[in-house]
Amino acid sequence: WENVTNTVWWQDFPRRREPDYLSLFSISYGEMNNSRSDFAAQLAGFMASLIVDVPGQSHWIVELTNYDFTNAMGYLVASVPGMHSDRALKANQITPSSLDAKFLGLVEASVVGLSHLFRTTADRNGAQLKKLALFLGKTCENANGMLNVVLRRNTNIPADENAVSVLVPNPDKISSGDCIQLGFLPRNVAKWVSPLWDIGFFEFHGYVCREEALTATFGGNNKKGPSFLDMSKMTQDQNIAALCSLIASVQRCTGLWRLQEVLGQYNWPESQESDFIYGASSIGSSVSAPFLAAFAASVGKKSSQIFDSEESDPEWGCWTTSQELRNPSIRIIFPTIEQVKNACSGISPSRRILCFSEKTWQRLRNVGILHDAIPSPSNRVGHPMHVKVARRRFWSKASSSSSGWVYCGSHNFSAAAWGRPISSSVGIKASGLAQTNSTSRLHVCNYELGIIFVFPPMETKCIANQNRTKLDDVALPFIVPAPKYGPKDRPATAQAMREALAELSEREAKSLAEVEITENMTEEVSDEDDEEVNEATNYVVEEKEEDKTYAEKLWSQNVYNGLLDICNSLASLKQVHSSLTISGVINYNSHLGAQIIIKNAKFGEHNSAHSLFDSIRGDKPYSFLWNTMIRAYANGGCHVEALELYPLMRPNNLIRWRS
C-alpha cells in the first residue's frame, strides 16, 4: 500500500427499506438526466457478466437491490469482452407495448434452425420461402430497420421444456394467428427467458433485422402474472439465476460507447481553451492515430474548424483520423526511464507494473504527445504509480471557473480495454451515432471498471450525479501540467528497463536475481498483441453444430404437435395417430401420447384413450402428464374417466392436490 501509488474512490450507499428490482435496469436509455441513477444497473450488468456461468453466485445481483445508489457521485464506466453492437445506443427508439409497461433493454441473440423449413428438401417449390418473403414485405420496419416478430413459448416439446419459437406474423391477419415459423431461440437463451416468462415478471417481444439477428425487448407488465414490484418474493434459485442471465445479456454501452453515452449529454464548450490528459501504467500497442481519434470523438471532441460546405456531409462534426494527425488531441502521461531508475526501490517494482512496448514508442516518439509522470504530492516521488486517470478540462481566460470531467478506474490506455471500433464509417459522431440502418461494432477484450466525475459548464442545468466539488479540487496522482518529453527522454519501456538493469553492477544484478524469477507473476501485462488485428466490417456469427442439433430436435417434435393441433375431427386424429404409431414416435414420446389420449377423450373415444394409456404408461408413470389429462377429461365432461385416472396416480404420489 505504501510502496505503490494507487487511486481509490470510496462512497457509502445507504440500505433501502425494501428491495428495488427496477434499479437493476437502465429504464431510460438516452436520458441520463432523469431522477433515477443508472449506477446500480451498470454495476449489476458488470457483476452479472462475471458470475453468469456460476449460478450459485447469482444472489449477489439480488443483494444490490437492497441499496440505494441514486446519489452516486459519478457514472460507472465498464468494459466487458465481446463484439458489441451499436443497437444499445439506439435502444431509446424501442417503445413499450403499453402505457403501463417499461422498456428495460435489448438482448441480441440468433435464431437457430433457420434453414429447416426453407431448405430445398423441405420446401421444394419454394412455397414457404415465398410466404416468408410476402409476410416480411408487408411488415413495416421501425426506425432501426427491424421487423416485429412473435415469440411463442413451446411447453409441449419434450426435447426442451424451455423452448421458445420465433415466428413472422402475417400483418394482414395478426388477430387470426397466421404466422410462419423461422426457428427457435438458442437453448442457452431459452433456458433463462422461459422461467422469467412463465412467472409473469417480464414481457418478451422479438424483432428481426436485416442482419437476421434477433433482438428481444423486456418490459414489466402488471396486467398479467405477478407484479414486477413483487419480484422480492422470487426466492427460487433457478429464477434468480435466470434473472442474473437476463441482466448479463441486456445490451449496454461499454468501453468507448459508454464514454460517449455519459459525456455526450453535455454541451462542452469546445471554443474555450482545453487540455486532455491520460495517465496510465500501461499503454496499448494499438495506440495510434485511428484509436486516438476514436477515443477523442467518444468523449465529445469536435473539429474547431466548421465550414458551411461540410453541413451536408454525414460525417460533419466528427473528429477524424486525419484531424488527429494534424492536431493531436490527447497528451499521454507515462514515466520516463530516468524516473524509474531513480525510484526508491530501484527498477524491479516498475517492471511488474509498467507496460509500454518499444514498437509503440517508436511510432509515437515524433508525434509529441508523451509527457513525464512526476508523482504528486511530493512525498510520493520515487514510488511507482499503478494508476489509470484521465481528465479533460475547459477554461475561459475571462473567467476563473473551469468545467470538464475526471476518470479513475482500471482501464489502461488501450483498445483492448476501451474497445476497437469496427465500422465502414470514419470516426464516431460526437453527438451520437448516425441514425441509419448500418451497424457499427466495438471489439472489447478486457473486463474493466471505472468511474467518471462530471463537472458540467455553468449554463448546464442541474443533472443527476452532479456534485458540488469543483474540477480543480480533484487532486491527480501526478503533476499537471506534466513536463513534455525532451529530445533525449525515453519512456520506461520493457526494453529500456532491461537495458537499465544491465547497467547495474554485478553485485546489484545478483541481488535482483530472485526478482527476475518472480516476473511470471507480473501485475501489469500487455493486454494487446503487437500484430494488427484483422477486422472484417461484416461480422456474422455462424450457427454452432450443437445449436443445429438442438433446433432439429425441436423442429421434429414441433411438427407432430402441430399436426395434433389441427386435428378437428375423429377421422383426422386417427390418421395422425396411425402415422405416429407406425413411425414409432409414440413409443419414446409420451407427451404426444398424452395429447392423443386427451383428443380421444374429447371426441368420446374412451376405448382408444384407455388402450393408448395402458400401452404408454407401462412401468414409467412419472413420464406422463397425469394432471393435464385429468383436467382434460373433467373439462370435457368425462368425469368417469377422470376418476379412473385418479387412483392410478395417487399411489405414486403424482397428484398435486392443488391441481
Image: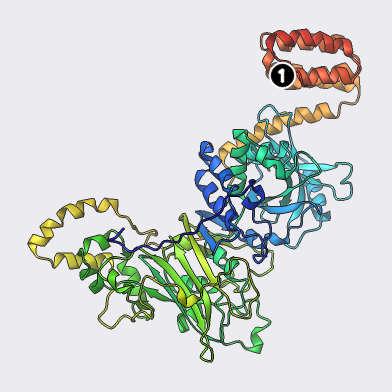
Q: Closest to the observer: 126 or 437?
A: 437
**Is 651 on the left or on the right of 278, as rendered?**
right
Numbered circles on residues, count: 1
Q: Considering the image in quadrants, where does the N terminus appear?
A: bottom left
Near mark 1 (Cα within 10 A), the count class, few <14, some 14-19 or many ≥20, is: some
**Amino acid identity at mark 1:** Ser
Residue at 72% x, 11% y: name it. Answer: 617
In the figure, 274 relative to 45: above or below?
below
**In this view of the protein, can residue 615 be seen by the observer?**
no
In the figure, 335 relative to 443: above or below?
below
The color scheme shown is: rainbow
Residue at 80% x, 18% y: name it. Answer: 629
x then y, percent, for residue 411: 44, 62
Q: Considering the image in quadrants, where does the C terminus appear?
A: top right
* Residue 31, quarter of picture: bottom right
x then y, percent, for residue 204: 73, 46
In the figure, 115 relative to 211: above or below?
above
x then y, percent, for residue 531: 39, 62
x then y, percent, for residue 35: 67, 62
**In this view of the protein, can residue 100 be seen by the observer?**
yes
Element class at badge 1? helix
* Residue 224, quarter of picture: top right
Q: Closest to the observer: 229 or 272?
A: 229
Residue occupying the far bottom of the picture = 398
**Is 111 on the left or on the right of 427, as rendered?**
right
**Is 167 on the left or on the right of 388, as rendered?**
right
Q: Closest to the observer: 137 or 151?
A: 151
Residue under pointer 1: 590
* Residue 456, quarter of picture: bottom right
Residue at 56% x, 73% y: name it. Answer: 426
